[in-house]
Image: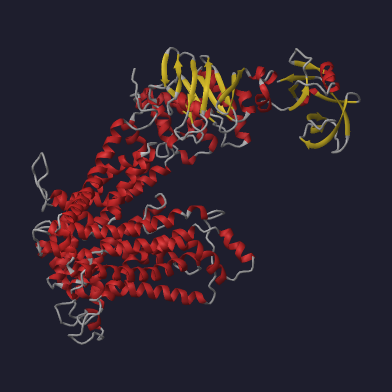
Amino acid sequence: MFRSQNRGNSQPRWLFSFVVVVIFFLSVLPLGRLAMTGVSSLFDGGAGALLSDPAVWQAVQDTLTTSFLGMIAAVILGGGFALLLTLSDVRCKTALGFLFMLPTMIPPQVTALSWIGMTGPSSALLKAIGMAPPLGSPQPLYSIGGIALLYGVQNAPLVFLSLRAGLLALPRDGVEAARLSGASSWQVLKDVILPLSLPGFVAGAAIAFVSCVGNFGIPAILGIPASIYTLPTLIYSKFAAFGPNTFADVSLLSGLIAILSVIGLTVEERVLRGRDYRVIGLSGQVAMFRLGNWRSIGELVLWLAIFITLVMPLTALIASSLAPAYGVPLTPATATLDAYREVLFKQTITRTAFFNSISLSLATALGLLVVTVLTGYYIVRSKSRLAPVLSALAEIPYALPGIVLAVALILVFAAPIPVIGISIYGTIWIILVAYFSSFFAVSLKPVVSAFRQLDPSLEEAARLSGAGFGRRMIDIVVPLVAPAAGASVILVFLIACNELTVSAILWSAGTQTLGVAIYNLDDSGSFNLAAALSVLVVIMVIAMMLVLELMAKRLPKGVVPWRS
Amino acid sequence: MAKLILNRLSKAFETGGRPAVNDVSLTVRDGGFLALLGPSGCGKTTVLRMIAGFEQPTDGSILLGDRVLADAGQMVAPEHRNMAMVFQSYALWPHMSVADNVGYPLKVRGVTGERRSSKIREALAAVRLEAYTDRRPADLSGGQRQRVALARCLVTEPDVVLLDEPLANLDRHLRQEMEETFREFHLRSGATMIYVTHDQAEAMALATDVAVMSEGRLLQVASPQEIYARPEGRLVGGLVGQGAIVTWPSASSQSRLLDWDMLQQFLNHSNGADCADILIRPQDVEITGEGVPARVTSVLFEGERYALKLALGDEQVLRAFSRQPVKVGDMVSVVIRSAWRL
């Protein structure tokens, strides 16, 4: 007679070992290695040299200044949108929300390029309408302020989402009770809604700050030409000027980034922890403010913000991609598709980049899915106290800025892998491993929420029908989580395809990704080619976001990141 | 098939606190229909889930015939127990058709082709759903879903069929119809059935044996008639059937079944030291010209009669029926024909 020792649990015994091994290799090993190198360089004196370098402290200061200002910009922009779209009766909310969320999915280097195309003396768009500043005048975005502004635009959606989630959970009866007590709309907003939604504000600001600290694309394109270095770009330049102390230096620098991020994430976690108990009473139907005559003005402000932060930069990007040659004015007669022809068919580098990015992203999305379905199943179904710990460990690599992880993986793989003796450093495989580690949490989240929604009795019924673990997985569990698994694949593909930070550190000749190709084209002065490639990337992003938007109705809540 | 034996079964969850199931011993005879009755949180669902194999006992054992299904050390996985279950949520797989849902246990057992489809047809015919073979569960009503879940239990001739509050989500009309279906199912299949419910009327109507649980312990197991006529203790007395429980001095009585003569003695010796709980069913309370005086405290019109609450001189409450209308505050005289000392 067959017997099992598994105490009524539905998982086979190997599942636990599998999950532990996966999480060890994707999270614990690289981060542990990074911490070890950092600590040992603190003791052997290498840290002293680095920390007495004024350039490092300048970079810390610039990182903090840009991130702080960027956070403020994000809070103003994202908070304003969240309040108006959630609480007021403005029209076209879905469209506004979708357009507002777009910048967060557009790669930062593309955002930076499009804004450069919109301002400064060489702007094809400004020249075409005759408003370009005279040649030789400085590009205003190559500054601390410019970096901060773009941080704000890029990360405003994070504040928007966080605040909106809080606002949607506000008890309507609380607002109605305040109304009946005689409070005006403004007083209700000031005395009830804002205090209750403060955690959402603070949490959103904290994630925006962390995201700014780890951003690479924007300061790489806007900062390096003006010799402004943030911590991520400083790490990049250390790698470019490779020396004997590079590994020790970059592990300390990424340690600094990790510390700043952990502070931010702790703030977020703290303020959100207290949120649940506040949500008492009937939530769900949100309180609504009628703006009356102010509605048109509100709508105008919202659309104007979308126009300035999204439409104008993207138009400028398209204009730059159509410009014939540097300095030649763009008119309908001179517009040309040469740049597209060049990036799609002529340049081997861009074609390799397309091939690399798409195959890396596909491999990551599909490979991770197999891992996350099993891991998610374990995390949701296991009664073990280890499950929440494992789930938290899986989250860390994505929560930390990508550059930290990239450095950690370099430290792990710089030497040949023990036992098999092969080195993957400098090959495409190290990027694949980094993607697996980085986007594990992205892939896991939709699957876990689908598992949480799944009535356990559906699986219990299958067990009583006689189906073992593999059978249940194939016949019952996987078909039922399929929509979420599909969303997980698209999301990982989307994010991996647009990624620059990790591959900027890990690429070498022949393994460049799309993000790296765009950055290198711009760096070498082929601005129109970089713009054309960026336009193609933006089109791909919008197409995939639309697919997810269409799927959203069939997915568990919280799977599509820009919907809540 | 063989009888199902629960031997000093206990289950404590890791969260601590009172054990969910505490030292429950019970034998369900082969082909029996046992109702596990108790208020929510009494541990009846945990017992059911241990029988199914979703939980492991922390002490004691479960046997089917002389095969040990589970004890604190080891257990047979649910997929190897040859049991079937109707879940409270029905647990139909939304991505499969009705026929695929019903036929899944056969598919897993490797039954294919004509044999499989004829078994599915038979099972669906037994619950009168032949016409719905290709529908999805989402297109069915609550009662139809329930019947699909039942048909899924029918196909494999399981040793034990478990039912977890299967009528809890249905309206009253549908409940009666489904009770009929369950009874029919039990007669046809001859399977041992265990039925968890908190509704005593349901338990009495369906089962051949009723087990009453409270706070993890088994209070009494008996046939419905027995448990109605001779409940053990205040909890069972209060849970099964209608009735009022009064506390009177009864030291002088040996018998537990009390008639009006004995009750009159208790009423007259209100200073006695030994008090006992006495269950009085409303149909045994007769409103006549004689007997003890009582005041009407509430009247509920039920259609065929009035249900009354009466307060006796010592303010203890009785329940009674009346065919004539009475008003709150009226004084009546009652005779108690029969009562049961708990």
Residue A379: name its quadrant.
top left
For residue A233, side relative to residue A156 (left or right) = left
Indicate whether B254 appears above or below A473: above
Residue at (45% x, 19% y) in the render = B61
Question: As drawn, is B56 to the left or to the right of B28?
Answer: left
Name above or below for residue A184 compared with residue A119.
above
Q: Is residue A54 visible?
A: yes
Residue B88: image x %, image y %? 51, 34
Q: Nearer the viewer, residue B230 or A196?
A: A196
Q: Quadrant of the C terminus of chain A?
A: bottom left
| Of the pair A127 and B19, the residue shown nearer to us | B19
Image position, residue A157 (x, y; %): 36, 64
Q: Quadrant of the N terminus of chain A?
A: top left
Coordinates of residue A123 in the picture (x, y in percent): 22, 79
Identify the residue at horizontal 45%, vertical 16% (top origin): B64
Question: Can residue A111 be seen at all in this image of the molecule?
Answer: no
Seen as rendered, the residue at the extreme right is: B289
Of residues B181 and B263, the one nearer the viewer is: B263
Q: Quadrant of residue A187?
A: bottom right
Asked whether, in this view, residue B137 is left or right of residue A135, the answer is right
Colouring convention used in this rendered image of the protein = secondary structure
The x and y percentages for residue B52 are 45, 25
